[in-house]
Image (spheres, grey):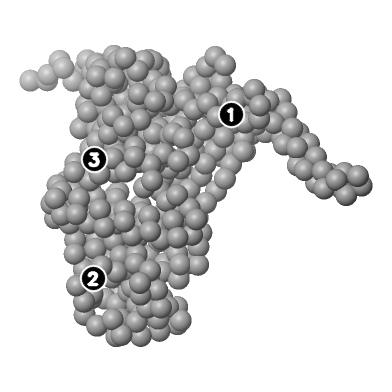
Amino acid sequence: MISTLATLPDIPSQAQEQSALPLRLEVLGAAQRTAAMGVWRLLEDELSHTRLTSSLIWTQTWLKHYGSQIPHHFLVGYQGSSPVAICLITESRQPQFGPLTIRTLHVGTAGEADADSVCVEFNTLLVRFEDHAEFVTLIQRHLADYSRCDAISWDGFDLAELPAEMLNGPQWRTIIKPSFYFDLRRVRAEGAEPITHLGDSTRKTIRQNHRDLGTVEVDWSETPRQAEEYFAELVALHQSRWQALGEAGSFASRPFREFHLDLLHQLVPQGRAAMVRVRTGGKTLGCTLLHIDQNRALVYQCGWTTETAAKSPGVIKDYCSLSECLRRGFDAYDFMAGDSIHKRRMTTDQGQLVWASCQLTPWKFETVERLRAAKHWLRTLWPRTEAAS
């Protein structure tokens, strides 16, 4: 018997019909945070999303510590009646010159005052891979139409996440920063020791100072209580070193300090963050705050003692930390954005992160630049005027 079903046309399911629909945006205001977080949780579960800076924990914690200070709203991407993407939009207003203020809309957890900023890196969107390009386009259109906006900023994204045509537009200004990392996966595949992949002088420094320091112990926080203990040491070491150089230090900011401590309490039990402490002779050489993102250990902040400066405590700290990360199965030990001799010495490869800004009111930026140039010129002229008098 021949089934009549074989002759019937395929009837698309509701999911198939919706997947053929274009994305549309829905805006949720700051007062609708609970609803937005519900969508965030749903999508994170459905997409098995593991990226840290667009995770529910990161976003909720940031909103807890900065949301009352910084205007924000949420953009939800829908396909039919189903949410398929979400992101946070924040707003900063920075005085530039006299009465001129630049109002910038940021994609993701950004927009804080410089002294309080978490300086988000490896920023991402919570969206299905196949909808990523369309969601970026919709976000950009929404922000460009936003009233009284002077600039749009995509902070700390991987270069590959933003379309080239967007970055190369005449109104765009981009800053590309290297992200130096040690490729642990390659070393593991070779069965080699990490030190064999470092330069001659760095290997010599590590071997000599390691020998002089004696037994070095590496403590890895397994509990929030341990993480809090090591974090307190990190803060003290970091602040002491930078204040000796005449700088305030990152942890001078209470919101910054409390944000990271709060995150540690949540992420350490999940294996998504860790505090590493390196000690010798009962004294701490240094501590490192690691964020874990896609099996990569990201060096978010660190501090080391100045008492044994001649023994390169920063180098020993990082070598011991990356060796422990190799032992624990991580793919990379990443120093994140920025360039320094230390980062180059301790790494094997580099990626790229981009800070991209679109100027929507070019006249305001041009005016600010001209006023700054005039102020600089007057400062150079003033000594001559005094000398002439």
Residue 283 circle label: 2
Residue at image position (91%, 44%) is 389
Where residue 135 appears, as percent x and y from the top left, is 42, 27
Q: Which residue ends up furthest to the front in the rendered image?
A: 389
**Image position of 277 (left or right of 29):** left
Whether residue 200 is situated above or below residue 148 in the rendered picture: below
Residue placed farthest to the left in the image?
A: 1
Q: CA distance from mark 3 to mark 1?
A: 30 Å
Numbered circle sitting on residue 95: 1
167 horizontally vs 292: left or right = right
| Residue 207 visible to the viewer | no
How far apart are the two marked residues, 1 and 2, measured between alpha carbons? 45 Å
| For marks 3 and 1 on the same chain, the one whose residue lies earlier in the sequence | 1
Q: Are marks 1 and 2 in contact (CB under 8 Å)?
A: no
Image coordinates for residue 12, horizontal then vertical, percent: 26, 18
Q: Nearer the viewer's eye, disc 1 or disc 2?
A: 2
Residue 262 shows which numbered tag? Answer: 3
What's the amino acid at mark 3? Asp
Q: Is residue 277 above or below residue 13?
A: below
Q: Is residue 370 visible?
A: yes
Residue drawn 64% across and 22% down? 99
**Nearer to us in this view, 137 or 20:** 137
Mark 3–mark 2 CB contact (< 8 Å): no
Work out how far the residue at label 3 is from the one at label 2, CA to CA, in angstroms: 26 Å
Position in image of residue 281 (x %, y %)? 21, 76
- Nearer to us in this view, 329 or 258: 258
User: Is disc 2 surrounded by few (<14), some (14 to 19) or many (20+) residues within 10 Å?
Assistant: few
SS of the residue at dot 2?
strand
Label 1: which secondary element? strand
